[in-house]
Image: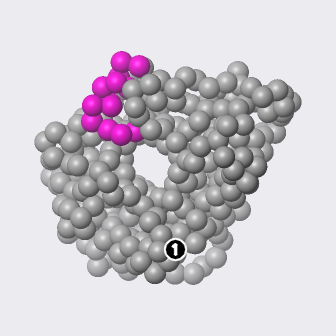
Amino acid sequence: MKLQLLSFLLASGIISTSFAEPLVIAHRGASGYLPEHTLEAVTLAYAQGADFIEQDLVLSKDLVPVVLHDIHLDTVSDVANKYPSRHRDDGRYYALDFTLAELKTLDIHERSELNGKQVFPHRYQGKASFKIATFAEELELIAQLNRQFNRQVGYYPEIKSPAWHQQQGVDISKIVLTILREHSLDDPNKAIFVQCFDFAELKRLRLELGANVKLIQLIGDNSWGEADTDYTALQTPKMLAEIAKYAQGIGPWLPQVFDLKVGKPTGLVQNAHNVGLQVHPYTFRQDALPEGVSSEQILSILFQQVKVDGLFTDFTDTVVNFLAKQKAKNPS
């Protein structure tokens, strides 16, 4: 959307000034500032005021859930240097092929392409040693920070590639659910959401594995190949009603909730709200905005016009500060 159209929408009141209190979800921790999913990134996101902190989960060879965005290791670690012969036939290094002890020897760096070029060039450029964290370590860290600061920052784990894990002979969903129960987190009243791109697995979590925790159906683009799920169909009112039988919300991609080309909401958020689903889209990145659009304009659209219930962001502080300013302007 062009800057002039945004300004018109704001000035004319088409973008509402009424305001709710949505959730700020730290996407892979404070990943706009430190390497994603590290304990350091979690701690910074906590300090910046996140309501929830995300943990993407994959399994190690000894079946320990570790916090990584991908089943692969090569784009965020020095695995190719430390274990040059441990790749599969496709040339990729998989977390599932390494024990936790081996994974702990790796140094984590800012996300890069396979050619080594940093994905977000202006983010962390240092050489400090960051390590892979286990799910249990992140649960403990956030719980201890909550205890000491008297806060209730929540957890937002994603079960990554469950069908792929099952093809490898392991059941990641069952393992993750076991850990949640060990920590008394399989509870709809606790500050935790469990998310997954795989609709069949989401239903399995609820119906077969007996999960009580709040569930979020992630919605991607069919071209991404995230799961054997038709994401176009999932956005229809009929399928949103079906999702609502198993989940408490959806996590769509930002372009699925607001069409910048025409400057208006797609209707997905309203349709989801109509069947009682929360909507937590991903991902607000202030260093990857559409040309000619500011952070404040995008956030105004999402919170005041589209009325999302929460937002994933790499920049927790930017979103927290925006919401604080809006609350100060509209204290009621």
Give me the residue at 58% from left, 65% from top: 49
> What residue range appears in magenta?
237-250
Image: 216 above or below 147: above
Give me the residue at 13% from left, 42% from top: 208
Residue in the foreground of this view, choosing between 125 and 332:
332
Give me the residue at 75% from left, 41% from top: 297
Q: Where's residue 229, x and y in %? A: 33, 30
Residue in the foreground of this view, choosing between 255 and 127:
255
Q: Quadrant of residue 32?
A: bottom right
Q: Where's residue 329, x and y in %? A: 76, 49
Image: 224 above or below 274: below
- Identify the amino acid type marked 1: Thr
Determine whether, in the image, residue 232 is placed left or right of residue 164.
right
Give me the residue at 32% from left, 30% from top: 243
Determine whether, in the image, residue 267 is placed left or right of residue 145.
right
- The answer to whether residue 236 is seen in the rendering is yes
Q: What residue is shown with label 1? A: 43
Q: Quadrant of residue 245?
A: top left
